[in-house]
Image: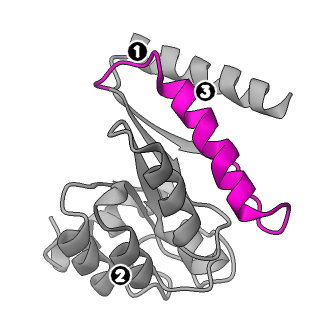
Amino acid sequence: MVRDLARFRFEQAVAVARDLNINRIVLHHGYIPNTGPPPRWVERCGRFWQEFLQDKPESLRIHLENVFETGPELIAEVVDSIGDPRLNICLDIGHVSCFSKGDCVAWIRHLKNRIGYVHLHDNHGQKDEHRGLGEGNIPLVEVCEALDESAPDAIWALECQVDKMMISHDWLSTHGFI
């Protein structure tokens, strides 16, 4: 029932995107650590996305966002198991910082060109604060350099609090990333 509801909601998202002439959607894939064996989850997730993508246009890009994964291996395995260019990863660096055992640069180096979209924001590693860039302790210069090197075609999106957008824009400009 949960998969059916997720598929229904994802189909709604695709329909709205089509109506708005949008060809990129960021979706959460639903992995919760320690709720079952990861290999079985990867297999079920792979089947779900293969079926879901069957009737979708070639121009559509779905970016699966990391949330609670403790390392990059699981989401990489999901994307690799599907092998469809319409599906890749939305790397949320804030989620890596507060939910992962690794660091953002290691994630980027592992995921490489599987990253198609990036959520940029900052935090102090304890909770998903969505602070402006430079207002937390994520090593943003190293993260952005690694993204430029390992995922040069990825789209970067600021996902910080609205009143922190200009601070974040200025940070990117000051550090030569825009």
**Camera-side residue of 5 and 141:** 5
Q: CA distance from mark 2 to mark 3?
A: 32 Å
Closest to the camera, between mark 2 and mark 1, is: 1
Circles 2 and 3, Cβ within 8 Å, touching? The answer is no
User: Dividing the picture into quarters, in which one does residue 145 lie?
Assistant: bottom left
The residue under the point 35% across, 18% down is 57
Give whichever of discs 2 and 1 has the lower sequence position. Answer: 1
**Camera-side residue of 84 and 95:** 84
Q: Secondary structure at mark 3?
A: helix
- The residue carrying mark 3 is 10
Q: Secondary structure at mark 2?
A: helix
Q: Secondary structure at mark 1?
A: helix
Percent coordinates x, y for residue 104 in the rendering = 44, 80
Q: Which mark is residue 140?
A: 2
- From the viewer's perspective, tell me whether residue 54 is left or right of residue 115: right
- Amino acid on which the number 1 mark rests in the picture: Arg
**Against 81, is 133 above or below?**
below
**Against 12, is 140 above or below?**
below
- From the viewer's perspective, tell me whether residue 60 is left or right of residue 93: left
- Amino acid on which the number 2 mark rests in the picture: Leu
- Amino acid on which the number 3 mark rests in the picture: Phe
Extent of the magenta region: 30-59
**Camera-side residue of 46 and 33:** 46
User: Dividing the picture into quarters, in which one does residue 178 lie?
Assistant: bottom left
- The residue carrying mark 1 is 18
Percent coordinates x, y for residue 88 in the rendering = 40, 48
